[in-house]
Amino acid sequence: MPTRHRDALAASCAGRLMLTLHPDGCVLIYPRPRWEAKREEVDRLPESARGLRRIFVGKAVEAEMDGAGRLLVPQDLRRQAELERDVRLMGVDSHFELWNSDRYEEYEKRALAGDLQRLDQVFGAEFKF
């Protein structure tokens, strides 16, 4: 875990984190209190989302940062997220995402293309960055 986040995580959850698989192919990392709120939110999803609930809750494991801020990601999650050598950790809202760097590059390209297309549909050609 990057140094800038360690103190905040130590204060907010004593370094206790929850890891789970996201359907996009990354590992989600939640501080334990945030995890509880998110799990309750997922539990309220309709029965038609049971596949998502199975992945999100069923793959969840508790982990704790060591004194150096390292985190052991279980082999099952590493394998499914294809976490090998080159990984990318990003803070997103109230959690972190751990990605295989190549997989994230592809995801980002697709997401940007789709988002730009949707912006064009909503705002038309006059929308510029």
Image (cartoon, rainbow, N blue to C red):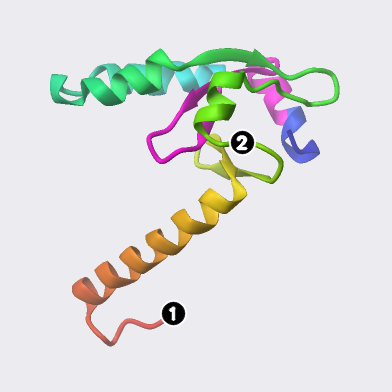
Determine whether, in the image, residue 126 is placed left or right of residue 71: left
Numbered circle sitting on residue 83: 2
Q: Specify which label sits upstream in the sequence, 1 or 2.
A: 2
Q: Which residue is mark 1?
A: 129
Q: Is residue 12 one of those drawn in magenta?
A: yes
Q: Is residue 17 one of those drawn in magenta?
A: yes
Place of residue 44 in the rendered image (x, y in percent of width and height, measured from the top left): 23, 19
Work out whether 16 lies above or below 95.
above
**Count of numbered marks:** 2
Does dot 1 land on a helix, a strand or a loop? loop
> Quadrant of the image for the C terminus?
bottom left
What separation in Å lies between label 1 and label 2 (alpha carbons)? 33 Å
Determine whether, in the image, residue 42 is placed left or right of residue 102: left
Does dot 2 land on a helix, a strand or a loop? loop
Place of residue 89 in the rendered image (x, y in percent of width and height, measured from the top left): 64, 42
Q: Amino acid at mark 1?
A: Phe
Place of residue 111 in the rendered image (x, y in percent of width and height, measured from the top left): 39, 59
Asked whether 48 or 4 is in front, the reply is 48
The local crowd at label 2, few if under 14, some if 14 to 19, many if 20 or more residues have their Cα within 10 Å, is: many
